[in-house]
Structures are given as C-alpha cells and as structure tokens.
Image: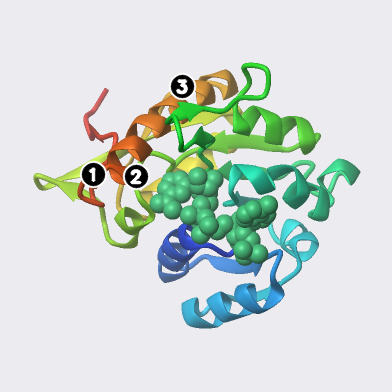
Amino acid sequence: MKIGVLGAGRMTEALAGRWITAGHEVFIGGRTPDKAAGLAERLGAAGSGSLREAAGYGDVVLLAVLREGLEDTLAAAGAAEGALAGKTVVDVGNSVDTTTYTQVTWDGRSMSERAAELAPGSHLVKAFNLAYSEVWKTPPLYGGRPLAVPYAGDDEAKPAARRLIEDVGASPLDAGDLSQTRHLEAMGAVVIRRLFGGADLSSTFAFLASDK
Ligand SMILES: NC(=O)c1ccc[n+]([C@@H]2O[C@H](COP(=O)([O-])OP(=O)(O)OC[C@H]3O[C@@H](n4cnc5c(N)ncnc54)[C@H](OP(=O)(O)O)[C@@H]3O)[C@@H](O)[C@H]2O)c1
C-alpha cells in the first residue's frame, strides 16, 4: 500500500517503521518539515513533506497527532477541500485529559468521529490506540500469543486496517462501527492512567487472539 502520514511523532515512528519493513511505501507529512524529513530518513520512507502532500499520497492515510492538533492538522492537510475524500484514514489518537484521566469528547463524539466530520468523504477507522508506541515496534506477543488489536470504523476502511494490524504481527479484532470509537478512546484513558502511573510500558488493554 501507499501510506501518507499526518504527524511525525512517536506513533508514526513505531508504526511506519514496521509498515516499511513489511513492504509498504510511506510518505511522512508533518507540521514541522525538518522533523518529518529526519524521521523519513531514519525509517527509509519513500519521502516527506507537507501535511497536504501526505494527504494526497496513496489511498491510506495514517492520522497520528495529538488531540490538540487535530483540527489544525486536518485543515493543513486540505481535508475540508476534499483532500481525504475516498481515502482510508487510520486514526491512532487518544483524547484524554491527563490531569483527570478522563476522555475528552466533542459533545459526546470521539476524536475519530470529529476527524470524520472534518474530512468529508473519507473512511475513518480507529486502531492501535490501546498501547504505548514502543509496543508496536516489535511483534506484540503476550504469553506467546499475538495481541488482538480492536479496530472500529467505516466498513470501507476495515480491510486496510486489518492488513496493517497483521503487518505489525498482531491480530485484528472488529469492534464495530465509527460510534464504537468512543469506547476505544475511553479504554485509552485507562491505559494512559496506568502508564503515567508508572506501569510497564509494554502494558496494554489486551485482548488475546482467538478465532471468534
Ligand atoms: N505515544 C504513544 O504511546 C501513543 C499510544 C497510543 C496512542 N497515541 C496517540 O497517538 C497520537 C500521536 O501520538 P504521538 O505519541 O505520536 O505524539 P507525539 O510524538 O507527541 O507527536 C505528535 C505529532 O502531532 C503533531 N501536532 C500537530 N499539531 C499539534 C499541536 N497543536 N500540539 C501538539 N502536537 C501537534 C506534532 O507536530 P510536530 O512534529 O510539529 O511536533 C507531532 O508530529 C496522539 O493522539 C496520542 O494520544 C500515542
């Protein structure tokens, strides 16, 4: 797949690195061009540039930005003008007030639902938000079994999400439609509270792979 990335932080470093190893072509777009270029060079990405260029690259877009930057990032990517229309957008974001460890919503809607509103015509799916970024850098095995990664969102986006979850060595677990991303983000608050409290960085909201 050709994957354009919005955001040049820790989650991009972890996930894009694995996807490049798996044979995908990745273009890293960032608010800070030097940071995106440096990360692209370290990972051996196909290229780097602006958020708008990343939005235009390929059929899949990784959205990996802090909640505070969601609206500015999608605006700079040209989402309101249709730059993400028809594309699968994989959102890894968490939206948590880390002073109280409570989920921050947009009138009850999740960060992924807000992203979908800001990017008309795109196909949103949320995944990878329930573990620290380091977890994604190696195949996530727990007790010898692969981690099952819940994903939720639009049906059109799910085949790509499943493939990208499998490409980090994890097992996809369908958690429902876009409205269910509210619950994945709430689970994210539980994980973040534990991590900020000093839990092992490999701790995760873990489902283990099963046939059902
Ligand atoms: N790190 C984790 O372990 C982890 C785990 C699960 C989920 N997540 C979620 O994944 C998303 C990305 O996290 P990350 O750890 O990769 O973040 P990060 O390392 O802090 O990088 C954040 C990225 O967002 C960009 N950004 C755009 N607008 C911003 C603004 N107004 N304020 C701050 N940053 C802004 C930053 O731009 P610059 O490059 O210009 O700084 C940077 O590229 C977040 O929603 C986070 O909650 C993170």
Quadrant showing the C terminus: top left
Point out residue 186 in the picture as x, y percentages from the top left corner. Answer: 44, 25
Q: Are marks 3 and 2 in contact (CB under 8 Å)?
A: no
Does label 2 point to a residue whose CB lies under 8 Å from ligand 1? yes
**Residue 75 placement, left or right of 37:** right
Q: Nearer the viewer, residue 39 or 84?
A: 39
Report how far apart the C-alphas of labels 2 and 1 lie in the structure: 7 Å
Residue under pointer 2: 131
Mark 2 neighbour class, 10 Å CA radius: few under 14, some 14 to 19, many 20 or more: some
Residue type indicated by callout 3: His
Mark 2 or mark 1: name the one nearer the start of the chain: 2
Tell me residue 142's x, y (percent). 15, 45
Q: Which residue is mark 1?
A: 203
Q: Is mark 3 within 8 Å of ligand 1?
A: no
Pointer 3 residue: 183
Residue under the point 21% across and 30% down: 210
Give ligand 1's quarter of the image.
bottom right
Residue name at image x 53 percent, y 42 percent: 93
For label 3, the crowd category at 10 Å Cα-Cα, with few meaning under 14, some 14 to 19 and many 20 or more, is some
Q: Say how many tags the image has.
A: 3
Tell me the residue at 90%/45% (across/down): 81
> Quadrant of residue 139 in the image?
bottom left
Are the residues at dot 2 and dot 1 in contact (C-beta closer than 8 Å)?
yes
Q: Is residue 88 visible?
A: yes
In percent of width and height, residue 164 lies at 45, 50
- Tell me if residue 6 can be seen: no
**Residue at the extreme front of the image, as rendered:** 99
